[in-house]
Image (cartoon, helix red, strand yellow):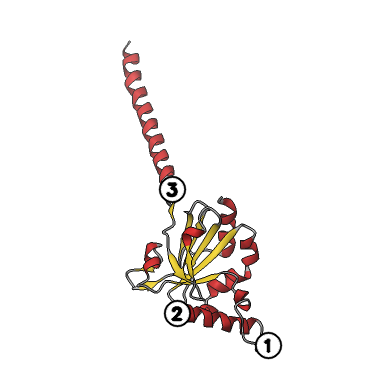
């Protein structure tokens, strides 16, 4: 009879320990899975390189999007990020996605840089036309009002007071499914293409 009395408390302690362990493991797994919260992409309307207004809202419901914040301080023709996007654009296009590239450069700076890039790619010396600027087969947008959209997308380093490169994969519903903030977590174009294929 005494043995049974001792067995019951010991069994209860073992069971309680196992339950506590399982609950702790579930909590850790959940924390890992919710590291990024899907959220709506902040709406914007920005001028492209031809000073035409582009509204994010017009793409929602129609296209997936790759929203890219690049360093336009020296012009788009000096952006390694834009060069990589251009080189992989056909693969991006097959995912059904639209690329919107944003910097703090003015439309005239983006237009001038696109012309220079045209002359690099086609050294014939002929002046670039609007069609020729499809050497960048995506829009170059200007966020020139105190980095407003950079801040909305957390693509601005408040500590240094400077914008940073960032990439966002947005589904057709207008939800940010993946976010890559530079420089440490920017990743590669192939990673973004894979994510674009996964989202609807």
Residue 160, image x, y percentages: 34, 73
Residue neighbourhood size for the residue with mark 1, other residues' Cα within 10 Å, grouped as few (<14), some (14–19), many (≥20): few
Which sits in the foreground, 66 or 188? 66
Residue at left 61%, top 62%?
92
Nearest to N terminus: mark 3 or mark 1: 3
Q: Which residue is mark 1?
A: 124
Residue at left 65%, top 65%?
90
Residue at left 58%, top 51%?
198
Residue 159, image x, y percentages: 32, 70
The quarter of the displayed image where residue 146 is located: bottom left
Q: Which residue is mark 3?
A: 32
Q: Marks 2 and 1: CB-CB under 8 Å?
A: no
Q: Disc 3 to disc 1, how far (Cα)? A: 53 Å
Residue 105, image x, y percentages: 45, 77
Q: Which residue is mark 2?
A: 73
Which circle, 3 or 2, is nearer the viewer?
2
- Callout 1 secondary element: loop
């Amino acid at each position: 009879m005494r043995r049974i009395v001792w067995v019951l408390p010991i069994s209860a302690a073992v069971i309680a320990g196992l339950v506590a362990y399982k609950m702790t493991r579930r909590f850790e797994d959940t924390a890992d899975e919710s590291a990024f919260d899907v959220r709506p992409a902040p709406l914007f309307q920005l001028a492209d390189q031809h000073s035409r207004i582009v509204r994010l809202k017009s793409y929602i419901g129609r296209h997936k999007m790759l929203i890219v914040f690049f360093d336009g301080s020296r012009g788009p023709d000096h952006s390694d990020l834009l060069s990589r996007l251009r080189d992989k654009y056909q693969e991006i296009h097959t995912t059904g996605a639209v690329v919107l590239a944003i910097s703090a450069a003015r439309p005239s700076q983006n237009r001038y840089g696109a012309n220079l890039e045209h002359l690099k790619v086609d050294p014939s010396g002929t002046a670039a036309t609007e069609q020729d600027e499809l050497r960048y087969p995506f829009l170059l947008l200007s966020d020139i009002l105190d980095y407003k959209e950079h801040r909305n997308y957390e693509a601005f380093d408040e500590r240094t007071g400077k914008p940073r490169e960032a990439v966002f994969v947005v589904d057709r519903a207008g939800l940010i499914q993946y976010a890559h903030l530079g420089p440490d977590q920017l990743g590669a174009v192939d990673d973004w293409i894979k994510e674009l294929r996964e989202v609807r």
